[in-house]
Image: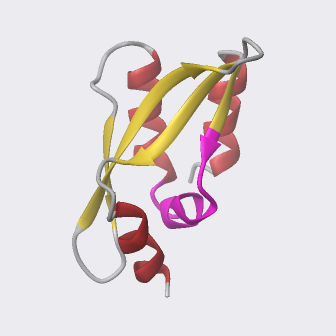
Amino acid sequence: MLSFEAVEEVCESKQTTLVIHPAIRRAIKGYEESFYVGLRCYLAGESDGVYFLPLNGSGYVRLIFSKRVSSGGHNLLRIDPLTKEGLARIKISLG
């Protein structure tokens, strides 16, 4: 099984800092492999950057990958819920 460290290594290999909320990081646990594939496809320009994160209980939250550049010129990869209520739903599903 893939670990989240492998996801971070992909970002490091692209000289990109991963920016992700701690609750989203915890919710991805158990889904690292599919998240890794989605991330690699996005970074290679092969996907639209939307990842469907399954939630404990029921349903899912759509996450969006977005590339940015910091004011200091560093490459960033942000992972955010697509909707405003997405982060709240993730936190509730974690208990």
Between 33 and 18, the residue placed more toward the observer is 18
Q: Is residue 95 above or below residue 62?
A: below
Residue at image location 63% in from the left, 49% down from the top = 4
Provide residue 64's location: percent of width, then percent of height.
37, 39
Image quarter in which the N terminus is found: bottom right
Q: Which residue is at 45% across, 28% downward?
A: 66
Q: Tell how many labels.
A: 0
Q: Which residues are magenta?
A: 19-31
Residue 74 rendering spot, x and y as whole percentages? 72, 16
Q: Nearer the viewer, residue 10 or 15?
A: 15
Q: Residue 35: where, in percent of width, then height?
A: 44, 44
Residue at the image point whose x is 42% and y is 82% from the top: 92
**Where on the picture, by quarter, is residue 61?**
bottom left
Horizontally, is 82 left or right of 79 in the view?
A: left
Of residues 12 and 89, the one nearer the viewer is: 89
Q: Is residue 26 above or below residue 76?
A: below
Tell which residue pokes out farthest to the left in this image: 59
The vertical placement of 19 against 62, above or below, is above
Q: Residue 10 placed where, x, y %?
A: 63, 27
Give the residue furthest to the right.
72
User: Between 34 and 90, which is closer to the camera in this rendering?
Assistant: 90
Magenta-drawn stretch contains 21: yes
- How is this picture coloured? secondary structure
Q: Would residue 5 be counted in the magenta stretch?
A: no
Left or right placement of residue 52 versus residue 18 in this view:
left
Q: In the rendered view, does 6 fall on the left or right side of 65?
A: right
Farthest front residue? 71
Examine the image and state in which quarter residue 77 appears: top right
Query: Where on the picture, by quarter, is residue 7?
Result: top right
